[in-house]
Amino acid sequence: MVESVSGAGQKGGEVLNPFVIAQQYVKSAVDALGLEPAVYEILKQPAKILEVNFPVVMDDGSIKVFTGYRAQHNTAVGPAKGGVRFHPDVSVDEVRALSMWMTFKCAILGLPYGGGKGGVICNPEQMSAGEIERLTRAYIDAIAEVIGPEKDIPAPDVNTNAQVMAWMVDEFSRLRGYNAFGVVTGKPIIIGGSEGRSEATARGVVLTVREAAKKLGMELQGARTVVQGFGNVGSVAARLAAAAGAKVIAVSEVRGGLYNPAGLDIRAVEEFKAHNGTIVGFPGAEPISNEDLLILDCDVLIPAAVENQLTAANAPHIKAKIISEAANGPTTPEADAILNERGVFIVPDILANAGGVTVSYFEWVQNLMNYYWTEDEVNQKLEASMARSFNTVYNMAVSKKVTMRQAAYMVAIKRVAEAMRVRGWLG
Ligand code: NAD
């Protein structure tokens, strides 16, 4: 039985809690692989969750106590790896689910990492830079015992960035008494960050679109492409897709979208957003709602915004031939079933958006070696890793006659289970 957890979200009867969804996919993959029930029992939740409550001095001199978490899902193949988010909605369930996905993402890419995730319940939009710095340092002090280059390596996530990573490295290094640059990834380049890291997730997404197009015998040149979300991942994915020859006909952000059937000039949209803080109002395109954008007549759809965008309600109307999930969890399980039934090629999130953690791994390796690669070297290694992993998952899907999502979970769980078996964790 897949267990339910507190706060399980439902929309029109659909299960929306990411932790419940992740457990369902794990159960199904463990069964399809014919593995012993102990594998599911171990993987259905994180091995370790640390909850910390720590005081921070606010700008007005008051003391505020914040709650944070760090979850380590499974470390059978290596240290835990995963981002830290600063958000008012951070919850233990969210951290549990996200740490679980990280284990599988790393396993699919063959990275020597298990899954981790952290978060602090806070609203950075209402905090000064000084308050965010003090909160970051206090969080690192509180979790220092469980992290480290050989134990658990955090990275940026929602509302955390290279500057926050720099404070984390500084605080951890101060505690240890030496520079421990490998304790987090996604750092500024001057203190051990990697070339190519900021574009890596989007680059990986576009590589999976290219590989999927090859399998379908479809030309990427001129492929009508729609991108939902114009943030770190969506804007770069749109730019790289256009650079690869695709015709990006629509993009959107939370406030609305842009549509031009002749193709958008993505650089110009990026510049417009840099000046205006929004893409809405960009000249030379028609406005379009996010709802209409998802069901546009197109060849490729890249959901790069938030979870639960492709649902049982809109899945029957989606026209894309390829969907590459840049966002985490953009497709509900019901929508997934409908789209697969309709023959849409879906590259699942745990494969499609794994380019970011792959280059985080490259950053960590460079830190351990103290030897740094050029952007070209990083991009070439990323391309090779993504193409290899895509084909491993594709071959599993073909040989077992399962969807790309089920195959991705099967590839990941097979690897983690093998490590647990040789280590004696399965008896
Ligand atoms: P971001 O905050 O930079 O951008 C998100 C974009 O989505 C913004 O343009 C925002 O306006 C838009 N958006 C938000 N809510 C929306 C809604 N309801 N409808 C339509 N658009 C909406 O975030 P990001 O870093 O680009 O991440 C996007 C997704 O990719 C998330 O699911 C994230 O977990 C996933 N992801 C990101 C990375 C990474 O390296 N940044 C890695 C793996 C996965």
Image (cartoon, helix red, strand yellow):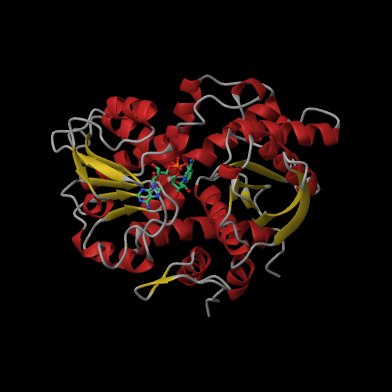
Q: Position of residue 343 (x, y in %)?
A: 22, 59
Q: Which residue is at the far left?
A: 262
- Which quadrant contains ligand 1? top left
Q: Which residue is at the far right?
A: 177
* Residue 92 position (above or below residue 365): below
Between 104 and 63, the one nearer to me in the picture: 63
Residue drawn at x 76%, y 45% as measured from the top left? 56
Residue drawn at x 45%, y 52% as measured from the top left? 328
* Residue 41 position (above or below residue 70): below
Does the rendering let one see residue 278?
yes
Q: Position of residue 362 (x, y in %)?
A: 58, 32
Q: Is residue 5 left or right of residue 80?
A: left
Residue drawn at x 79%, y 44% as measured from the top left? 141
Q: Position of residue 335 (x, y in %)?
A: 31, 65
Between 300 and 141, the one nearer to me in the picture: 141
In terms of image quadrants, where is residue 257?
top left
Q: Position of residue 208 (x, y in %)?
A: 35, 42
Between 99 and 281, the one nearer to me in the picture: 281
Quadrant (top left, top right, bottom left, bottom right) of the C terminus? bottom right
Q: Is residue 397 left or right of residue 218?
A: right
The total number of labels drawn is 0
Q: Is residue 393 left or right of residue 247?
A: right
Q: Which residue is at the far front?
A: 60
Does the rendering let one see residue 226?
no
